[in-house]
Image (cartoon, rainbow, N blue to C red):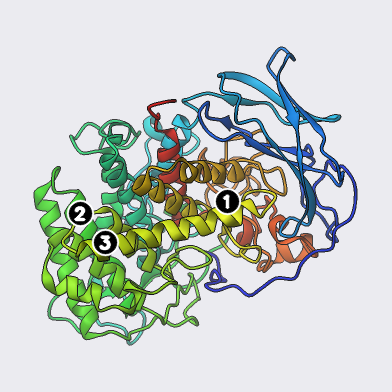
């Protein structure tokens, strides 16, 4: 994570005035220095569409009447046609747009182009296996981010192979015997392993907790749907393939082992709590491969938020891993119980926002939502009355804001508890369970309403383009998908798939935010090793890496210089220096991996 932390609750943004005609570049009111790539006025999912899924495009134009759209196959033959629907001003993008809906066309093929007047989209496919590659690549991101293990050429390719980072091999100081910051503790801790959080070499429990939960939850949901084989053993290129455990769970275990190593040992002050984070004592320069990091590493004071993240992720682990490794499941449950007890004994030990030297602060002084989430996971796993009472006694259990207007995130986790209670069989009264499920569908309906009101069908609010907005979009899609699971209603699947359209190019910039997917895709994300823009001998980010996305806060020097005056949904630049719009992070790729696995599933009618 970069020096400035992500915004938790963004302020409202001002609207952008509109003017212009059919455009190619994007913004109707151009910023002082635009970073928008040259692109077509016809914005599509640049990867393509599923035969049985929604197929909509957005056309940037100020025409007040309908325009004719034509879908051409690879030979140029018109295979479908229709009229666009004028939508007019779209505040987040600062554009005037029409919508083109060609969902009724269901034939598979490649090289399709959607043409409107004299403008044509980039070529795209229509096929049932559209997301199979992204399902694997989005998950492979976590293997690339592993700390404490070499990345083998045979698994990641020569460009991404590297020695293990932070195992104490010079110049590394290592994560095997890490001291605390001054006054925090008088001992060292073995905290090797885990995933590097983002473009730096920090490892944070509060971000690791939600990211691990999402990875494991993707498997838990797929198993409920009978679609888990695609996430099973030997489906990923990881060292553990072939061990009899689903590869997605093997990948999650690499982080779970680290999270459990962050628990304060018995007999020490704050025993059972979790250290908030471990990272360098000072910010390192760029580029820098992890094994070349010479900075001193430090443990930071335990926090209630980190401890409850550990409790929640470990409790989920105990439930989902049990069929594959009962001993590991038992260990997870023991850790979760100790973390829960410690958090109850220290309910207000907050990480300060000021602790941002060498790593992100991840400050969070509202932890009642983490208590609710952890209690829900422990109850879902054990069925024990004490955890049930903690669930039903929480104000979050009936709060209408558990699903916030901006979606869930590392600092807003009550929704995760609701999703677990809604989907994992338990002993709550039927009326209580039905109310929880209704809250999921109500949140999903809110996202659908927001998508219908916007030109690019985005589930986030018009003022929701803040640090990591793409992660919020993918997270909202998860709520939509779960609502579809609970109700069987197709509109929720449609909404979830349309969020993928946004991430893959149907957006204000005509930019795919996922490396390697789409004709114009992000490839200069902020990262110390994937730093080709700074050093041509280093690679671009691997395929399947999600950029943070538009951030109207302009919280880095590159964004401040080059994006001044941008419309909120266009405040993005594919530059390695723009860490506030273009960094990668595990908590953004985790919902993408969840969504890609969901989108890749074949339906009975598909």
Name the secondary structure under disc 3.
Answer: helix
Distance of mark 1 from mark 2, alpha carbons? 35 Å
Quarter of the rendering containing residue 226:
top left
Q: Residue furthest right?
A: 20
* Of the image marks 1 and 3, the number of the one nearer the N terminus: 3
Q: Around disc 1, counting alpha carbons within 10 Å, would you say few (fewer than 14), some (14 to 19), or many (20 or more)?
A: many
**Left or right placement of residue 438 versus residue 14 in this view:** left
Residue 93 rendering spot, x and y as whole percentages: 74, 55
Q: Nearer the viewer, residue 410 or 445?
A: 445
Q: Is residue 169 visible?
A: no
- State which tag comes first along the sequence, 2 or 3: 2
Q: Which mark is residue 562?
A: none
| Mark in the foreground, 1 or 2 | 2
- Please name the residue shown 40% across and 58% down the image: 440
Can you identify the residue that label 1 sits on? 547
Q: Are marks 1 and 3 in contact (CB under 8 Å)?
A: no
Label 2 residue SS: loop
In the picture of the structure, the residue carrying the numbered disc 2 is 425
Task: Label 1: state its secondary structure.
Answer: loop
> Residue at (28%, 38%) from the top-left corner?
247
Pick the residue in front: 291 or 337. Answer: 337
- The location of residue 486, given as percent across then percent down, is 34, 49
Q: Residue 433's mark?
A: 3
Q: Nearer the viewer, mark 1 or mark 3?
A: 3
The spot of residue 79 in percent (x, y) is 69, 17
Image vertical order of residue 335 relative to residue 104, above or below:
below
């Amino acid at each position: 994570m970069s020096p400035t932390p992500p915004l938790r609750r963004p302020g409202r943004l001002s609207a952008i005035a509109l003017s212009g005609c059919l455009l190619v570049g994007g913004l109707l009111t151009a910023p002082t220095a635009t970073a928008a790539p040259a692109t077509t006025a016809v914005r599509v999912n640049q990867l393509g569409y599923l035969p049985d899924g929604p197929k909509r495009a957005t056309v940037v134009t100020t025409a007040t009447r309908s325009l004719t759209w034509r879908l051409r196959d690879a030979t140029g033959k018109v295979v479908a046609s229709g009229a666009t629907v004028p939508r007019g001003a779209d505040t987040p993008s600062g554009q005037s747009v029409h919508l083109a809906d060609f969902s009724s066309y269901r034939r598979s093929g490649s090289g399709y182009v959607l043409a409107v007047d004299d403008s044509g989209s980039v070529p795209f496919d229509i096929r049932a296996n559209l997301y199979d590659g992204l399902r694997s690549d989005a998950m492979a991101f976590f293997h690339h981010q592993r700390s404490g293990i070499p990345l083998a050429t045979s698994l990641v390719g020569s460009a991404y192979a590297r020695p293990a980072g932070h195992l104490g091999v010079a110049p590394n100081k290592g994560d095997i015997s890490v001291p605390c910051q001054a006054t925090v503790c008088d001992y060292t801790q073995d905290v090797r392993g885990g995933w590097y959080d983002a473009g730096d070499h920090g490892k944070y429990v509060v971000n690791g907790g939600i990211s691990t939960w999402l990875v494991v939850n993707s498997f838990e949901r797929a198993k409920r749907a009978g679609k888990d084989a695609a996430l099973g053993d030997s489906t990923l290129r990881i060292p553990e393939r072939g061990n009899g455990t689903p590869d997605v769970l093997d990948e999650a275990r690499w982080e779970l082992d680290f999270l459990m190593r962050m628990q304060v040992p018995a007999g020490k002050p704050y025993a059972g709590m979790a250290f908030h984070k471990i990272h360098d004592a000072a910010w390192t320069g760029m580029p820098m491969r992890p094994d070349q990091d010479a900075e001193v590493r430090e443990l930071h004071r335990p926090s209630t938020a980190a401890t409850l993240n550990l409790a929640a992720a470990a409790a989920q682990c105990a439930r989902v891993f049990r069929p594959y490794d009962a001993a590991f499941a038992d260990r997870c449950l023991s850790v979760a119980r100790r973390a829960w007890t410690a958090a109850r004994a220290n309910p207000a030990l907050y990480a300060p926002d000021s602790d941002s030297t060498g790593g992100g602060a991840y400050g969070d002084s509202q932890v009642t939502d983490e208590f609710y989430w952890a209690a829900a996971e422990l109850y879902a796993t054990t069925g024990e009355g004490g955890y049930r009472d903690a669930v039903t006694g929480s104000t979050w259990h009936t709060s209408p804001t558990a699903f916030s207007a901006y979606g869930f995130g590392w600092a807003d986790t009550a929704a995760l508890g609701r999703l677990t209670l809604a989907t994992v069989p338990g002993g709550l009264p039927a009326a209580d369970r039905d109310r929880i499920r209704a809250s999921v569908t109500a949140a999903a309906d809110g996202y659908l309403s927001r998508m219908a009101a916007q030109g690019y069908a985005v589930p986030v609010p018009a003022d929701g383009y803040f640090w990591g907005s793409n992660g919020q979009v993918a997270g909202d899609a998860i709520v939509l998908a779960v609502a579809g699971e609970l109700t069987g209603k197709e509109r929720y699947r449609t909404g979830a798939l349309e969020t993928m359209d946004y991430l893959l190019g149907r957006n204000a910039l005509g930019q795919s935010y996922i490396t390697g997917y789409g004709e114009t895709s992000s490839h200069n994300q902020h990262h110390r090793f994937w730093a080709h823009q700074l050093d041509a001998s280093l690679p671009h980010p691997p395929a399947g890496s999600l950029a943070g996305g538009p951030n109207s806060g302009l919280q880095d020097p590159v964004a401040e210089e080059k994006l001044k005056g941008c419309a909120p949904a266009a405040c993005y630049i594919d530059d390695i220096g723009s860490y506030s719009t273009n960094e990668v992070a595990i908590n953004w790729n985790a919902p993408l991996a969840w969504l890609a696995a969901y989108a890749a599933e074949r339906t009975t009618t598909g």
